[in-house]
Image (cartoon, rainbow, N blue to C red):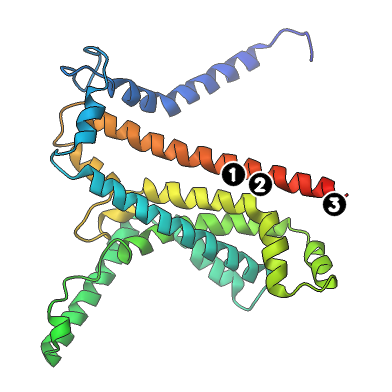
Amino acid sequence: MSDRPRGLAFTALAAFFALYVLFLYGPTLTILALSFQGPQGGLTFPMNGVSTHWFGKLWAGGGIVDIWAAFGRSLRLGFVVMVLTVVLAFFAGLAFRKGFRGANALFAIAVASLIVPSIVVSLGIGLEFRLVDDAINALAAATGWGWLQDHGTAMGLYSSALGAHLTWTLPFGLLIMFAVFNRFDPAYEEAARDLGATGAQTLRHVVVPILAPALVGVALFGFTLSFDELARTSHAIGGRNSLPLELQGLTTTVTTPEIYALGSLTTAVSALVIGTALAASLLLQRRRARRSLAGA
């Protein structure tokens, strides 16, 4: 390391970076602090005591909305989106790696949703499902089929909301897998086939283990983007809200730090998922390194 004193440019850049970090994490730290207000605390500083009162109230439930039901819906939807994002992005990466006619156009269509405003995507999906509902109701009226008479709506957590979230998570998963496959050495697959492995065996025992850290990253993107998504869910989820939608609604009705406790809880869940993904990625990389050493 150089012993020369830091120049003015370094000091200015360090100050700018510190301000950036403060701007990025300051709101989260503020909400975390205010969630530990005392029973008589409010939504702003100064804090009136320190306690876990609002976390206890949140845990007890019985508020304006059923927070835990919304929390469960977001978790379940996030898990399904995560699994589908990993599977679809992985096999799409394999397909694009081989190349096929129209690949460039299909890629452009797949990532186009990233540049379309999220609220427009949500409105479009909601409109599509309303048209489906209208068609089903018209068919029920024309045919008199009893099993169609009780049709409510095709919109729901695992239909319209799932599709809306996949328009957000899949492009990120595809971009990650394309970047990973561009660096993937096909010699590994050729060696496996030379040793007599079938295509499925090569995929299972060679390709997937090597790409496992990247797949963990795709899973992380899939879950966190879905769990926190608001705009694309707003018009596409049907009659029951996800947790971000309930949080948005509570900002106009709740006047206690209970909403900050809920925000801290959701942040903790996201941090737990990120930490688990990073730990899994490191574990997979170490296992791969040990196998490489053992093979050498």
Circle 3 SS class: helix
The residue to which callout 3 is attached is: 295
134 vs 88, nearest the viewer: 88
Q: Quadrant of residue 204?
A: bottom right
The residue to which callout 2 is attached is: 284
Instruction: From the top left corner, tell me how far across and down residue 184 is, in percent.
Output: 74, 58
Mark 2 residue crowding within 10 angstroms, few (<14) / some (14–19) / many (20+): some
276 vs 190, nearest the viewer: 276
Mark 3 residue crowding within 10 angstroms, few (<14) / some (14–19) / many (20+): few
Report how far apart the C-alphas of labels 1 and 2 lie in the structure.
6 Å
Circle 2 SS class: helix
Q: Is residue 123 above or below residue 39?
A: below
Q: Three-letter amino acid code at disc 2? A: Leu
**Residues under numbered marks 1 and 2 in contact, where contact means CB atoms less than 8 Å apart:** yes
**How many numbered discs sit on the rendered protein?**
3
Residue farthest front in this picture? 294
The residue to which callout 1 is attached is: 280
Q: Three-letter amino acid code at disc 3? A: Gly
